[in-house]
Image (spheres, rainbow, N blue to C red):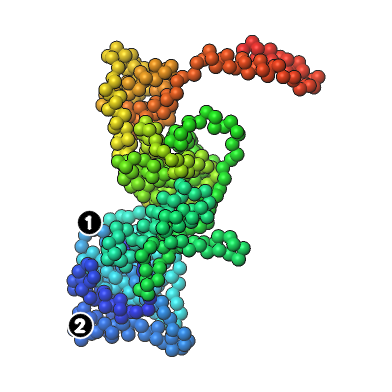
Amino acid sequence: MIAAIKAAGSNTRGLLAYLYGPGRHDEHLDPHLVAGFAMLGMPDPGRDENATLTELGHYLDEPVRLRNSEFGKPVTDHVWHCPVRAAPEDRYLSDAEWGEIAQRIVQAAGIAPADDDLACRWIAVRHADDHIHILATTIREDGRRPKLHDSGIRIGDECRQIEQDYGLRRLKKGDRTAARRPTQAEMHKADRLGWEQTSREWLQDRIRAAIPHASSAEELLAYLEAGDILVKPRHGPSGDLLGYAVGRPGDLNKDGEQIYHPGGKIAPDLSLPKLKARLETSGPEEHPTARRNQPITPWHQATEALDTLHTEITGTSADGGGDARAQAHITALGVLIEATAQKSSADLRSQLQSASRAFARAQRSQIRADDRAAHALRTAARDIANTATGPDGSALAALVAALVWAAVLAGRWHEAKGHAHQTNAARRAVQHLQSAADDALAPTLTDLEARRPKNDTCRALANDVRAAVPEHAERILADPGWPALATVLADAEDGGHKPHQLLKEAAARRELGTAHSPARVLITRIQHTGRHPAPNRRAEAARRRTTTQAAVVQAPKPEPASKAPAAAAHRQRRHRH
């Protein structure tokens, strides 16, 4: 059961005309009252042919008129509107049951607390089988305003209890991290103008698409402006950016003025403070040679960054730091999915964009993120977004496969924390990512299967599989992707790698028990880790000897007499080694 509070201004009579009218999009059948603050003597235009909407409106507005006459300054925002809708699969509810539900909703909201004779006036109108509309005027009989702060949370909690009491579909409890639902007015406007999305949905997609390209809030706003988004920044006296609002071209109000939406009203994580925290938090300083052995392309760098995600997400600490790090990595993961979608080939972009939209809810929770912890992932996303060239097939397949596993880990973490909405969002994203991963690997599979090794080689490689991952061996060998995996292992062996070792390393990076195709998972992992020839052990040993000899030629620093024997013994041990 969903109850959505809507601000309805000051025209009580106008809202009544809609509730008792034929409907603009949904047909209204038999509109009538099912509950109200005082049913006895209340006019019901749906049941009494002599009652009028104007009469009912005056009846509801009486406390408002009295307050306005007493204080002089008129109240202009006193109409409270709350549609309450059952799920499509729920049973038929009688008028009496809907009346009881309406009573519980207004009590929970604070419109009409139990046993309060001076509460606000309200009614519940039913004009369809599956929902009612509650209308209230938010001036109490004593002239005061009701306490409606956090009424949406209280109503949501009451709806969850109503579902249990009436045997209705059970929905998940809200956690105040969801983006605002489009209003009926916004949806009707989008239909009228031929837009596929409402303005706030459209703007949310554009802002999320811009995040991987920016390293500061100012860069983000500049990127949006360059993309024809209307931006209205708010600066303080010092010139500092204090807030922003964005508008969709052509989205005008009734007076022909451009409509702007503050970022925080579009989605909770798009407010300026939260964007600044994510974009402008620097990472730990890197040693100049720290990236020497990193892959040379952003796609490989991103895959390497995802390899540490299992430790970051599942790690915990007594002070809660583990949760903050995990949340930061999950947030950055959403940015990486968006960046990958933007730079992928056209045949994969649709699924990856769908995954990005689905994962948006999984990116945020009530746990505050330690954004500094996910610097590597955010850097990888930015590198991908700003690269001029696309990836080769194997690099993209490896990255998307890694994204699948990362989203699975994110869903498990949310589930362990009791984050129901985020868990469902992560699972929806996994479905889209898995489809994209299958499509990304398809051309590579065709080539690999055409180069399948000879039977003797395949049998030898099968023995390597049984030795390296015995618990998954039979499932891997029965997988339709086994011939392609055999080719990958043979190619790696020709490059100097040991198939047995590659298999063990790949299986350690990704749990195979939940993989729908373990052979495909191993293909992408081994192609990624085995893309360079194995290092020549003799050449490496020679390089180390040369480095050691060069160090010996340099004059050593004077050593304290007390430490000289120990240092000499240490050099002897290194020489013997």
Relative placement, left or right, of 398 versus 286 is left
Which image quadrant is residue 432 in? top left
- List x then y, in percent, for residue 361: 39, 51
Query: Quick one: 485 or 86, which is closer to the camera?
Result: 485
Decide: few, some or many residues near mark 1? Use Cα within 10 Å; few <14, some 14-19, many ≥20.
few
Disc number at residue 48?
2
Amino acid marked by disc 1: Glu
**Is label 2 in a helix, a strand or a loop?**
loop
Relative placement, left or right, of 122 versus 304 is left
- List x then y, in percent, for residue 321: 54, 44
Q: Quadrant for the C terminus, please.
A: top right
Q: Is residue 324 above or below residue 234?
A: above
Q: CA distance from mark 1 to mark 2?
A: 33 Å
Q: Earlier in the sequence, mark 1 or mark 2?
A: 2
The residue that appears at 20% across and 82% down in the rendered structure is 48
- List x then y, in percent, for residue 82: 33, 69
Amino acid marked by disc 2: Asp
User: Dot 1 corresponds to which residue?
Assistant: 89
The extreme top residue here reads: 576
Circles 1 and 2, Cβ within 8 Å, touching? The answer is no
